[in-house]
Image: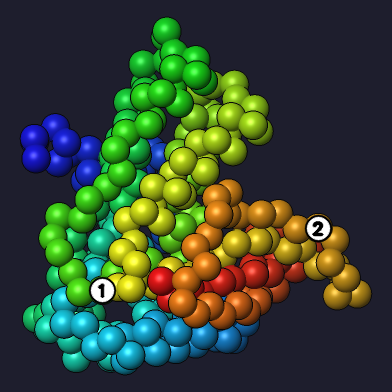
Amino acid sequence: MSSEKAADLRPSSRILRRMGLIEDQNGILSRYQGEIDSWEGHLSNTKNFISDCLTSCRPQKIAVLGSGWLLDLPAELLAKHEMVVFYDLRHPEFVRKKYRDQKNFHFELLDVTGGLISKTYNLCRRRKGHDPDSIYKQLQIPGLILPDTFDYVISVNLLNQLDILIIDHIRENFITDQKWEQKVRRMIQENHIKLLPTGKSCLITDYEEVHVNDKNEIMDKTPLVHCTLPSGKYRKTWTWNFDTHRSYHPSFNTMMNVVAIKL
Protein backbone atom coordinates (compact mmCIF):
# COMPACT_ATOMS: atom_id res chain seq x y z
CA MET A 1 0.00 0.00 0.00
CA SER A 2 1.38 3.43 -0.95
CA SER A 3 2.01 6.00 1.78
CA GLU A 4 -0.58 8.27 0.13
CA LYS A 5 -3.23 5.54 0.20
CA ALA A 6 -2.36 4.70 3.81
CA ALA A 7 -2.81 8.35 4.78
CA ASP A 8 -6.21 8.43 3.05
CA LEU A 9 -7.31 5.46 5.17
CA ARG A 10 -6.20 7.20 8.37
CA PRO A 11 -7.38 10.83 8.09
CA SER A 12 -5.62 13.35 10.31
CA SER A 13 -7.24 14.82 13.41
CA ARG A 14 -7.36 18.12 11.54
CA ILE A 15 -9.52 16.61 8.78
CA LEU A 16 -11.75 14.81 11.26
CA ARG A 17 -12.23 17.98 13.28
CA ARG A 18 -13.05 20.13 10.26
CA MET A 19 -15.50 17.56 8.93
CA GLY A 20 -17.25 17.30 12.28
CA LEU A 21 -16.34 13.74 13.28
CA ILE A 22 -14.87 14.60 16.67
CA GLU A 23 -17.85 16.77 17.60
CA ASP A 24 -20.26 14.05 16.46
CA GLN A 25 -18.44 11.33 18.39
CA ASN A 26 -18.38 13.37 21.58
CA GLY A 27 -22.05 14.18 21.00
CA ILE A 28 -22.92 10.47 21.03
CA LEU A 29 -21.51 10.10 24.53
CA SER A 30 -23.30 13.22 25.75
CA ARG A 31 -26.60 11.98 24.34
CA TYR A 32 -26.08 8.56 25.90
CA GLN A 33 -25.44 10.11 29.30
CA GLY A 34 -28.75 11.96 29.03
CA GLU A 35 -30.66 8.93 27.73
CA ILE A 36 -29.16 6.01 29.68
CA ASP A 37 -32.48 4.41 30.59
CA SER A 38 -34.01 5.00 27.13
CA TRP A 39 -31.01 3.47 25.37
CA GLU A 40 -30.80 0.41 27.61
CA GLY A 41 -33.06 -1.77 25.43
CA HIS A 42 -31.22 -0.95 22.20
CA LEU A 43 -27.76 -1.50 23.67
CA SER A 44 -28.85 -4.76 25.29
CA ASN A 45 -30.41 -6.04 22.06
CA THR A 46 -27.25 -5.16 20.14
CA LYS A 47 -24.93 -6.88 22.61
CA ASN A 48 -27.14 -9.97 22.79
CA PHE A 49 -27.34 -10.31 19.01
CA ILE A 50 -23.55 -10.07 18.66
CA SER A 51 -23.09 -12.54 21.52
CA ASP A 52 -25.41 -15.04 19.84
CA CYS A 53 -23.50 -14.73 16.56
CA LEU A 54 -20.11 -15.22 18.20
CA THR A 55 -21.28 -18.10 20.38
CA SER A 56 -22.60 -20.00 17.38
CA CYS A 57 -19.35 -19.87 15.37
CA ARG A 58 -16.65 -19.35 18.05
CA PRO A 59 -14.18 -17.27 16.01
CA GLN A 60 -10.71 -16.54 17.36
CA LYS A 61 -9.81 -13.42 15.37
CA ILE A 62 -12.50 -10.74 15.16
CA ALA A 63 -12.75 -7.35 13.44
CA VAL A 64 -15.17 -4.75 14.79
CA LEU A 65 -16.09 -1.92 12.42
CA GLY A 66 -17.32 1.26 14.10
CA SER A 67 -16.33 0.55 17.71
CA GLY A 68 -16.55 4.15 19.00
CA TRP A 69 -17.23 4.25 22.74
CA LEU A 70 -17.88 0.46 22.89
CA LEU A 71 -21.29 1.18 24.38
CA ASP A 72 -23.02 -1.43 22.22
CA LEU A 73 -20.42 -4.20 22.30
CA PRO A 74 -20.26 -7.22 24.64
CA ALA A 75 -16.75 -6.38 25.84
CA GLU A 76 -16.56 -9.19 28.40
CA LEU A 77 -17.37 -11.78 25.75
CA LEU A 78 -14.99 -10.26 23.22
CA ALA A 79 -12.22 -10.37 25.83
CA LYS A 80 -12.39 -14.18 25.74
CA HIS A 81 -11.36 -14.34 22.08
CA GLU A 82 -7.79 -14.59 20.88
CA MET A 83 -7.68 -11.23 19.06
CA VAL A 84 -10.15 -8.41 18.56
CA VAL A 85 -9.25 -5.47 16.30
CA PHE A 86 -11.42 -2.38 16.67
CA TYR A 87 -11.47 -0.20 13.56
CA ASP A 88 -12.67 3.39 13.65
CA LEU A 89 -11.71 6.89 12.50
CA ARG A 90 -10.94 7.84 16.09
CA HIS A 91 -10.71 5.91 19.34
CA PRO A 92 -11.58 8.04 22.37
CA GLU A 93 -8.76 8.22 24.89
CA PHE A 94 -11.18 7.09 27.61
CA VAL A 95 -11.74 3.81 25.75
CA ARG A 96 -8.04 3.22 25.14
CA LYS A 97 -7.25 3.72 28.83
CA LYS A 98 -10.15 1.57 30.01
CA TYR A 99 -8.96 -1.43 27.98
CA ARG A 100 -5.20 -0.84 27.96
CA ASP A 101 -4.57 -4.00 30.01
CA GLN A 102 -6.67 -6.12 27.66
CA LYS A 103 -3.80 -7.48 25.57
CA ASN A 104 -5.97 -9.10 22.92
CA PHE A 105 -7.74 -5.77 22.17
CA HIS A 106 -6.15 -3.72 19.39
CA PHE A 107 -7.38 -0.26 18.40
CA GLU A 108 -6.60 0.65 14.79
CA LEU A 109 -7.40 3.85 12.90
CA LEU A 110 -9.21 3.18 9.63
CA ASP A 111 -11.64 4.95 7.34
CA VAL A 112 -13.92 2.04 6.49
CA THR A 113 -15.31 3.91 3.47
CA GLY A 114 -11.97 3.13 1.81
CA GLY A 115 -10.61 6.68 1.97
CA LEU A 116 -13.64 8.80 1.08
CA ILE A 117 -13.25 11.05 4.12
CA SER A 118 -9.87 12.39 2.95
CA LYS A 119 -10.98 12.34 -0.69
CA THR A 120 -14.06 14.45 0.10
CA TYR A 121 -12.09 16.89 2.24
CA ASN A 122 -9.49 17.44 -0.50
CA LEU A 123 -12.08 17.78 -3.25
CA CYS A 124 -13.92 20.44 -1.26
CA ARG A 125 -10.71 22.34 -0.60
CA ARG A 126 -10.15 22.57 -4.35
CA ARG A 127 -13.67 23.56 -5.34
CA LYS A 128 -12.73 25.24 -8.60
CA GLY A 129 -13.47 23.12 -11.65
CA HIS A 130 -15.57 20.58 -9.78
CA ASP A 131 -19.27 19.95 -10.13
CA PRO A 132 -21.44 17.20 -8.60
CA ASP A 133 -20.95 14.85 -11.59
CA SER A 134 -17.16 15.09 -11.49
CA ILE A 135 -17.20 14.69 -7.70
CA TYR A 136 -19.30 11.53 -7.96
CA LYS A 137 -16.84 10.02 -10.46
CA GLN A 138 -13.92 10.77 -8.14
CA LEU A 139 -15.75 9.27 -5.17
CA GLN A 140 -16.12 5.96 -7.01
CA ILE A 141 -13.00 4.36 -5.60
CA PRO A 142 -12.46 0.64 -5.03
CA GLY A 143 -14.11 -0.63 -1.86
CA LEU A 144 -12.01 -1.20 1.21
CA ILE A 145 -10.12 -4.41 1.83
CA LEU A 146 -9.40 -4.96 5.51
CA PRO A 147 -5.66 -4.91 6.24
CA ASP A 148 -5.79 -8.38 7.79
CA THR A 149 -7.82 -11.59 7.60
CA PHE A 150 -10.43 -12.40 10.23
CA ASP A 151 -12.62 -15.27 11.33
CA TYR A 152 -15.50 -12.87 11.94
CA VAL A 153 -16.41 -9.27 11.09
CA ILE A 154 -18.90 -7.16 13.08
CA SER A 155 -20.40 -3.95 11.68
CA VAL A 156 -22.15 -2.26 14.58
CA ASN A 157 -24.46 0.77 14.26
CA LEU A 158 -22.28 2.10 11.46
CA LEU A 159 -23.84 1.54 8.02
CA ASN A 160 -26.25 4.48 8.16
CA GLN A 161 -23.50 6.76 9.55
CA LEU A 162 -20.94 6.27 6.78
CA ASP A 163 -22.36 8.77 4.32
CA ILE A 164 -23.33 11.55 6.74
CA LEU A 165 -19.98 13.34 7.17
CA ILE A 166 -19.31 13.07 3.45
CA ILE A 167 -22.68 14.41 2.29
CA ASP A 168 -22.76 17.17 4.91
CA HIS A 169 -19.30 18.40 3.95
CA ILE A 170 -20.11 18.37 0.24
CA ARG A 171 -23.31 20.32 0.92
CA GLU A 172 -21.25 23.04 2.60
CA ASN A 173 -19.20 23.51 -0.55
CA PHE A 174 -21.38 22.57 -3.52
CA ILE A 175 -25.00 22.74 -4.60
CA THR A 176 -26.41 19.22 -4.83
CA ASP A 177 -29.86 17.69 -5.10
CA GLN A 178 -31.55 14.77 -3.38
CA LYS A 179 -31.18 12.43 -6.35
CA TRP A 180 -27.42 13.00 -6.48
CA GLU A 181 -27.07 12.57 -2.73
CA GLN A 182 -29.04 9.34 -2.81
CA LYS A 183 -26.69 7.98 -5.46
CA VAL A 184 -23.64 8.75 -3.31
CA ARG A 185 -25.24 7.35 -0.17
CA ARG A 186 -26.19 4.14 -1.97
CA MET A 187 -22.70 3.68 -3.37
CA ILE A 188 -21.06 4.14 0.05
CA GLN A 189 -23.43 1.75 1.79
CA GLU A 190 -23.23 -0.91 -0.93
CA ASN A 191 -19.43 -0.89 -0.68
CA HIS A 192 -19.67 -1.41 3.07
CA ILE A 193 -21.95 -4.42 2.72
CA LYS A 194 -19.50 -5.96 0.22
CA LEU A 195 -16.88 -5.76 2.96
CA LEU A 196 -18.82 -8.21 5.14
CA PRO A 197 -18.07 -11.86 4.30
CA THR A 198 -21.04 -14.19 4.00
CA GLY A 199 -21.11 -16.74 6.79
CA LYS A 200 -18.55 -14.84 8.84
CA SER A 201 -20.14 -11.52 9.76
CA CYS A 202 -23.08 -9.67 11.22
CA LEU A 203 -24.54 -6.23 10.54
CA ILE A 204 -26.49 -4.02 12.95
CA THR A 205 -27.83 -0.70 11.70
CA ASP A 206 -30.57 1.87 12.15
CA TYR A 207 -32.63 1.80 8.97
CA GLU A 208 -35.39 4.32 9.69
CA GLU A 209 -35.80 7.49 11.76
CA VAL A 210 -39.27 7.96 13.25
CA HIS A 211 -40.74 11.14 14.79
CA VAL A 212 -43.50 10.75 17.39
CA ASN A 213 -45.69 13.47 18.92
CA ASP A 214 -47.07 13.87 22.46
CA LYS A 215 -49.96 11.53 21.66
CA ASN A 216 -47.48 8.80 20.62
CA GLU A 217 -48.58 9.24 17.01
CA ILE A 218 -46.06 8.69 14.24
CA MET A 219 -45.69 11.96 12.34
CA ASP A 220 -43.12 10.94 9.74
CA LYS A 221 -40.47 8.39 8.87
CA THR A 222 -37.14 8.95 7.14
CA PRO A 223 -35.17 6.07 5.56
CA LEU A 224 -31.55 5.87 6.68
CA VAL A 225 -30.41 2.95 4.52
CA HIS A 226 -30.30 3.66 0.79
CA CYS A 227 -29.32 0.27 -0.58
CA THR A 228 -30.76 -3.22 -0.46
CA LEU A 229 -29.88 -4.98 2.77
CA PRO A 230 -28.85 -8.63 2.56
CA SER A 231 -31.49 -11.09 3.69
CA GLY A 232 -28.98 -13.01 5.78
CA LYS A 233 -29.42 -16.28 7.65
CA TYR A 234 -31.25 -14.67 10.52
CA ARG A 235 -32.46 -11.19 11.39
CA LYS A 236 -34.01 -9.33 14.29
CA THR A 237 -35.61 -5.89 14.49
CA TRP A 238 -36.36 -3.52 17.35
CA THR A 239 -37.03 0.14 18.10
CA TRP A 240 -34.43 2.38 19.74
CA ASN A 241 -35.76 5.27 21.87
CA PHE A 242 -33.05 7.56 20.58
CA ASP A 243 -34.10 10.97 21.90
CA THR A 244 -36.80 11.40 24.53
CA HIS A 245 -35.72 14.92 25.60
CA ARG A 246 -36.23 16.47 22.15
CA SER A 247 -32.71 17.79 21.92
CA TYR A 248 -32.30 16.13 18.50
CA HIS A 249 -35.63 17.30 17.09
CA PRO A 250 -37.36 19.95 19.21
CA SER A 251 -40.89 19.10 18.09
CA PHE A 252 -40.88 15.32 18.48
CA ASN A 253 -39.49 12.34 20.31
CA THR A 254 -37.14 10.53 17.93
CA MET A 255 -36.97 6.76 17.59
CA MET A 256 -34.80 4.63 15.33
CA ASN A 257 -35.92 1.36 13.83
CA VAL A 258 -33.00 -1.06 13.92
CA VAL A 259 -32.25 -4.28 12.08
CA ALA A 260 -29.62 -6.87 13.00
CA ILE A 261 -28.61 -9.41 10.36
CA LYS A 262 -26.50 -12.51 10.65
CA LEU A 263 -24.93 -12.90 7.21
CA separation in Å, label 2 and label 1: 37 Å
Residue 205 vs residue 107: left or right? right
The reply, left or right, for residue 44 in relation to residue 118 is: right
The mark total stands at: 2
Q: Determine the image quadrant of residue 71.
A: bottom left
Visible in this render: residue 221?
yes
Residue 42 percent coordinates (x, y): 55, 80
x and y percent of residue 158 in the render? 44, 61
Q: Which residue is mark 1?
A: 152
Residue positioned 44% across, 13% down in the render: 130
- Amino acid residing under circle 1: Tyr
The image position of residue 242, as x and y in percent, is: 62, 71
Image quadrant holding the N terminus, namely: top left
- Tag 2's secondary structure? strand
Name the outermost residue toward the top.
129
* Residue 220 image label: 2
Give the residue displayed 88% in from the left and 70% down from the top: 217
| Viewer-nearest residue: 44 or 35 | 44
Instruction: Say whether residue 255 is left or right of residue 104.
Output: right
Residue at 41%, 56% in the rendered image:
193
> What label does residue 71 carry, if any?
none
Label 1 residue SS: strand
Q: Position of residue 5 (x, y in %)?
A: 16, 36
Query: Is any atom of residue 13 visible in this view?
Result: no
* Nearer to me, 49 or 167: 49
At label 2, counting other C-alpha atoms closer than 10 Å, the crowd grade (few under 14, some 14-19, many 20 or more) is few
Residue at left offset 28%, top offset 91%: 76
Q: Earlier in the sequence, mark 2 or mark 1?
A: 1
Q: Nearer the viewer, mark 2 or mark 1?
A: 1
The amino acid pointed to by label 2 is Asp
Image quadrant where one finds the C terminus: bottom left
